[in-house]
């Protein structure tokens, strides 16, 4: 009976932590979209709201880590239960980093709003961010439902994000070569594109945690990276 009581208490603790994870995930999804919209529309007020909202994301990560540490100390989980708690810590860390990248996007809005637009780049960046946001939603859904197949699909889709980044990188190079007046704006736009690409990597890490939870092993086959810009001279 005592063991059953402990198990029940652990389940309640874990449900509470996972509810916080989903709340954090919702805030991060919104941050991605709002940052991308603020960039496309040059809405500095919206961008500032994204920057302020990042504090709530950081606070949630801190609270989740504290609660997870408390559960480990108090419940002494083993095997699958310990794996669940550790996955919570890793997922929250990835969400926090994605939130930071969204904040970085918002920070550059005020700079870019003072510069001439570069073709349709802001819209292209928003489409790229939207794809990452969809991936994040699916990764979190997979986490809740323990759906390794959906998680694996998210992992594969990161290649699409990498390819979108590569295309934008080439476009920015072309714009800079065609008109030196585009250089400053394109440098900022490139950093934004890279931040979105890195968001995709962190979403992929969340999806890998789902596979780990379900199978007990992190996917060990080398994931093909679509980002080829690091190979350039």
Image: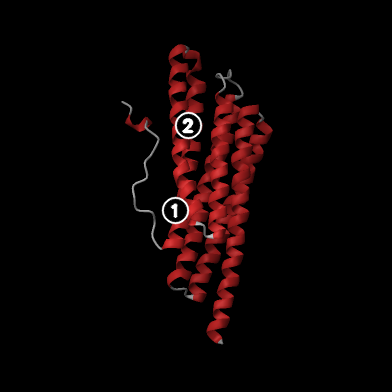
Q: How is the image coloured?
A: secondary structure
Asked whether 178 or 130 is in front, the reply is 130
Alpha-carbon distance for marks 2 and 1?
22 Å
Where is residue 33? Give x, y as percent: 62, 39
Looking at the rendered image, the quarter that the C terminus falls into is: top left
Determine whether 7 is above or below 117 in the image: below
Asked whether 85 or 44 is in front, the reply is 85
* Residue corresponding to mark 1: 208
Q: Residue at x 43, y 59 (%)?
A: 212
Q: Secondary structure at mark 1?
A: helix
Q: Secondary structure at mark 2?
A: helix
Looking at the rendered image, the quarter that the N terminus falls into is: bottom right
* Residue corresponding to mark 2: 164
Residue 225: quarter of image:
top left
Q: Residue at x 55, y 55 (%)?
A: 61
Visible residue check, residue 42: no
């Amino acid at each position: 009976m005592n063991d059953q009581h402990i198990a029940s208490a652990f389940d309640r603790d874990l449900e509470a932590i996972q509810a916080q994870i989903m709340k954090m995930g919702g805030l991060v999804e919104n941050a991605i979209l709002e940052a991308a919209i603020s960039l496309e529309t040059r809405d500095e007020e919206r961008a500032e709201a994204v920057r302020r909202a990042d504090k709530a994301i950081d606070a949630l990560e801190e609270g989740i880590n504290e609660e997870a540490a408390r559960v480990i100390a108090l419940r002494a989980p083993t095997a699958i239960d310990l794996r669940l708690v550790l996955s919570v810590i890793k997922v929250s860390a990835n969400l926090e980093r994605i939130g930071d990248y969204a904040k970085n996007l918002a920070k550059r809005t005020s700079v870019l709003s003072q510069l001439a637009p570069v073709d349709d780049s802001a819209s292209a960046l928003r489409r790229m961010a939207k794809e990452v946001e969809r991936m994040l939603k699916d990764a979190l859904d997979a986490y809740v439902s323990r759906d390794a197949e959906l998680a694996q699909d998210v992992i594969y889709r990161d290649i699409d994000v990498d390819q979108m980044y590569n295309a934008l990188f080439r476009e920015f190079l072309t714009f800079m070569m065609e008109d030196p007046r585009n250089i400053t704006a394109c440098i900022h736009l490139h950093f934004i594109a890279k931040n979105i690409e890195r968001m995709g990597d962190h979403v992929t890490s969340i999806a890998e945690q789902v596979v780990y939870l379900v199978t007990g092993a992190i996917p060990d086959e080398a994931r093909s990276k679509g980002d080829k810009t690091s190979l350039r001279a």
